[in-house]
Amino acid sequence: MFSKRNLPIVLLILGAGIFVAFRTLGIGENPPTKYEKILKNVGEMLEQIHYSPKQLDDKFSKEVFAKYLSDVDVEKNVLLASDVEALRSKYETRIDDEIQGKAPIQFVPSVSEVYKKRLAETEVLYKDILSRPFDFSVNDSVDQNYDKAQFPKNEAERKESWRKRLKYLTLERYSDLLDQQEASKNKPGFVARSNEDLEKEARGKAMKVMDRFYDRLKVKVNDDDRFNMFVQTIVQSMDPHTDYFPPVEKRYFDEQMSGHFFGIGASLREEEGNIKITTLVTGSPAWKSGQVTVGDVITKVAQGAQEPVDLTGFQVEDAVKLIRGTKGTEVRLTLKKADGSTKVISLIRDEIVQDEATFARSAIVNSSKGKIGYIYLPEFYADFDNPKGNRCSIDVAREVMKLKEQKVDGIVLDLRFNGGGSLYDVVQMAGLFVEQGPIVQVKDRDGKPQILPDHDKSVLYDGPFAVMVNELSASASEIFAAAIQDYHRGVIIGSTTTYGKGTVQRNIGLDKSLGFMEANSELGTLKLTLQKFYRISGGSTQLRGVASDIVLPDLYEYSKIREKDNPDALPWDEIQKADYTPWKYAYDLNIIKGMSNERLKNNSAFNLIRADAEWLSKENDKVFPLSLQKYREEQKQIKATIKQIETLSKLAGASELNVSALPQDAHKYDNDKDKGTRFQSWLKDKRNDIYLGEAVNVLDDMITQKNLVYNK
């Protein structure tokens, strides 16, 4: 992830070459429509600025054609093969012409037209199928690997595809109802229901699921959404991390990066097709109003005096984007109260800080060898719009200083599930733990590699250090882990490798008249891959990620979720090694690895997690039975395996870690009961974390290793 305000060091990296290239995008007449402007500007940016652009030709057009139809009809049960062939004959090799402004935009409107027609047909179809009972005693199966599926050749084949899908949807709910009835049979007032009655209720539940899904497709998803999806398909065909953001989506992205947004201070969830308020933030506009209650259903949202938008068919994220906005502006909510009454209220948006969900936090783990400091960092956040806003490098430095005040003997930094963020901040943060020197190398498509160094000669913390990662530690997380590993500064603990995202993106607005420095535009924003980054040892983290020094088995190891599993991912390569000096206080990694491996070998929990994860990954790729008996047998085994993994992943009783809040944080949430409760729940989770337990063991080994010498 990247943004336009990534401090001067980034501007030096970009150099004048990109600026010159961007200015050439103005050549030619402005396209007449908004869609054509967007598409033409996107095409020019991809060709002239993207790190490794594919040629916009017939081959690219065919690729986008196939991907877009698969995105529009994921399960391949709405469109017919004849529809696809008709579209193919007209548009398969002309999408590149539409992108380059050589042909009018006709592909998406044509797809929309036929899709809407088939959607109406399949709505009648699913209602008809769900109106009659299913026979779950018949040996039948459904293959839900939609990537391999073909569009149905005729209406009969499409109907059969729907029958199997709806039967499985009903079977899931029917089996659940049977379990619920079995669990309730000894309770007072229990009345047994027939299998026929339960099957009918299961079909009713499946009908509600489908109705909500179709409401969204008919009410929420419009022509703009389908066009935006088309642009996204185009840009992601270049690489998985180039994205197109319409203005509302860009604002939401910035909010997630900064940890701040302007809204009403209410958490929402979807429940039976309704958007319901679940919590209120103390001191927020919703809380102060006294008119909003947990449990209220939001039925409509209006921007000031504008016409309200009905939330029928909306998901939580859709509703959130409507409710958030600019500070000081009015949003009007139509609420359905618990007593059935309806009330329209006006709220003025104010700043909401997601400190507990986004920002760094720390705790103390008391181990057998001393005090271990634990820092949790969910992402490399930075508030680019506010010079005084939160930045992860500053916040982590603050947490390190707090831990040093407690005289910790070692520190664990947890980057599990951290998807990355600000490149500038990861360089600054690595500098907290190493002396002056290079942290990462970056290269654009034309230039020589540039080194991003830490200029600060001082080291904030020089004691034993470990970094926790997993398969979803990506981008900036991988830069940090790679630097720590290359400097031999600490031990990387986690999955076999991290995610494998070794590319750098920058947000560029699509309005060329504003220039490339402006990341926001009414036409939308392109988050464009401009560079690849490389370890100071020369190799890229792209595709291969960072290999852990100490590997811990986990649930995701065999899941196909890494960069290497995406066919559009850019390749791995390497450049010349940078000039750097490894950490002066050497330790014997082989000894530390050997001690951990010995523990893992004798740890039945980790061994079972490895076996269970491998078994579950195979279950996800198979054909699913539609017979009740076979389904319940399989589900029983799957549920037992998942429960076993959940149990094994948690320490219990005497094995629990001694985790406590820092004295400085003991009263941090006294004025917000909900946040305080969630903070205590977070501490409890850490006490039960088997992975943190082994990280603490590793730090204990580092502390006691005889040849390890640290300044005190």
Image: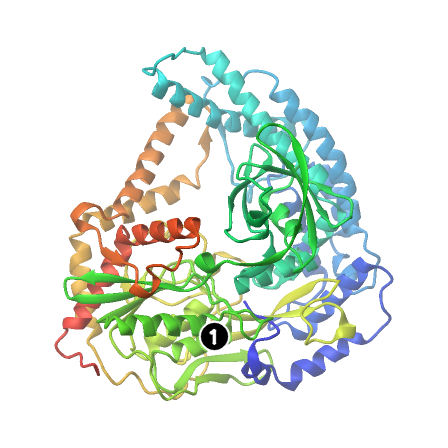
Q: Residue at x 21, y 83 (%)?
A: 711
Mark 1 lies on residue: 425
The quadrant in which residue 63 appears is: bottom right
- Pick the front one: 675 or 178: 675
In the rendered view, does 348 fall on the left or right side of 620? right
- Pick the front one: 5 or 56: 5
How many marks can you see? 1
Is residue 140 at least partly visible in the picture?
Answer: no
Looking at the picture, how far across and down is residue 85, in whole percent?
A: 73, 43
The quadrant in which residue 231 appears is: bottom right
In the rendered view, does 42 fall on the left or right side of 672? right
Looking at the picture, how far across and down is residue 600, in whole percent?
A: 20, 56
Q: Quadrant of the N terminus?
A: bottom right
**Crowding near the residue tagged with mark 1, few <14, some 14–19, many ≥20 C-alpha atoms within 10 Å:** many
Is residue 264 at least partly visible in the picture?
Answer: yes
Looking at the picture, how far across and down is residue 473, in whole percent?
A: 42, 62
In the rendered view, does 12 fall on the left or right side of 357? right
**The residue under label 1 is which amino acid type?**
Asp
Local SS, label 1: helix
- Asked if residue 21 is positioned above or below residue 53 in the image, the reply reads below
Q: Specify the farthest residue to the left.
A: 706
- Pick the front one: 60 or 308: 308
How are the residues colored? rainbow
The quadrant in which residue 692 appears is: bottom left
Looking at the picture, how far across and down is residue 78, in whole percent?
A: 67, 35
In the rendered view, does 432 fall on the left or right side of 166? left
Q: Residue at x 73, y 70 (%)?
A: 44
Q: Residue at x 62, y 35 (%)?
A: 213
Q: Residue at x 31, y 15 (%)?
A: 186
